[in-house]
Amino acid sequence: MSNADRTSDPLERLADEQERTHEGSAEEPARAAILGDPTGRRDPRARALARTVEALLFLSSEPVSVEDLAAAAETSERAVFEALAVLAERYAPGLSGIQLRELGGGFTLASDPSCEEAARRLFSRARLATLSPAQAETLAIVSYLQPISRPEIARIRGVSADSATATLLDRDLIEEAGHSQFGAVLYRTTTNFLKLFGLRTLEELPDVARWDPTPQEQAELRERLVRAGEARAESGP
């Protein structure tokens, strides 16, 4: 194996680094730790630090140097090398869709090259555009008061909700949910809404988990919001 091939492998690269740093010193056992423990045991401290290093690499959009990792984790560079060795084994080629790679003087977590085509297909899809204030306001009203009609939304907001509602429908964030007693279309949030906001159920919406209103309290809240919207409309811009 050439030197170039050897240093392209994170495990080998780490071993070489440890050899240069600790050659002939009392810390030579660190090299064995990097190349792999034949007994199948790994220092628990290295495994614990590996979790921290893994999180730092995951959070960073750029490669992170061993020096910076050591400073952030408040540990030695030698300890970081051992932690990186744990990660190199965990993300060895062929074992995971993620790989530990050395780039630009630091280390980073990158996707396996074999996943490139699938990743390109996924991320080439159109992204959901940021919601406008009017759309976000309308979505909040629907999420908390659903099912709710467009006239009710307009009364609460004090302005027409036609455009915002149409956009939320197009983006699959709300959907029709029957008709009111007066014939108006009712709207509710969709499963896509839950996915977008990382919710398992509507019960996980902010505040709802801390406040469980009775049907009477819900009706009172709806009426208060409607009155506030009417007052806003009467006062003008």
Image (cartoon, rainbow, N blue to C red):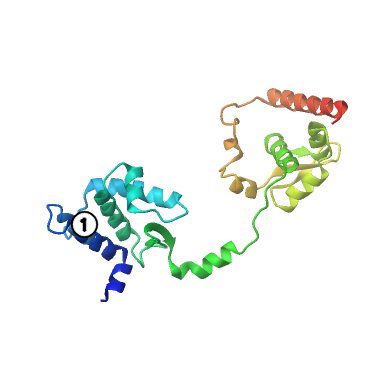
Q: Position of residue 235 (x, y in %)?
A: 86, 26
Q: Quadrant of the C terminus?
A: top right
Question: For mark 1, what is the residue?
Answer: 21
The part of the image, by quadrant, that contains residue 20 is bottom left
Report whether 85 appears left or right of 192.
left
Q: Amino acid at mark 1?
A: Thr
Dot 1, crowdedness within 10 Å: few (<14), some or many (≥20)? few
Q: Nearer the viewer, residue 237 or 191?
A: 237
Quarter-wise, where is residue 152 in the image? top right
Q: Where is residue 11 shown, x and y percent of the image?
A: 28, 63
Q: Tally the numbered discs.
A: 1
Residue 52 % position (x, y):
35, 46
Say what secondary structure mark 1 lies in: helix
202 lies left or right of 92: right
State the image coordinates of residue 196 (x, y, percent, origin top left). Answer: 61, 48
Going 71% across and 34% down the picture, which residue do you hit? 145
Image quadrant holding the N terminus, namely bottom left
Q: Nearer the viewer, residue 216 or 207?
A: 207
Q: Nearer the viewer, residue 30 or 199?
A: 30
Spot the residue most to the bottom: 1
Q: Say if residue 36 shows up in the picture.
A: no
Q: Quadrant of residue 230?
A: top right
- The structure residue drawn at horizontal position 25% and vertical position 60%, both measured from the top left corner, is 17
Relative vertical location of residue 93 with respect to residue 26 in this rendering, above or below? below
Position above or below: 118 against 31: below
The residue lying at 72 percent from left, 25 percent from top is 221
Residue 16 visible in the snapshot:
yes
Relative to 9, 57 lies left or right: right
Who's the residue at 83% across and 25% down the image? 231
Above or below, 208 against 76 in this view is above
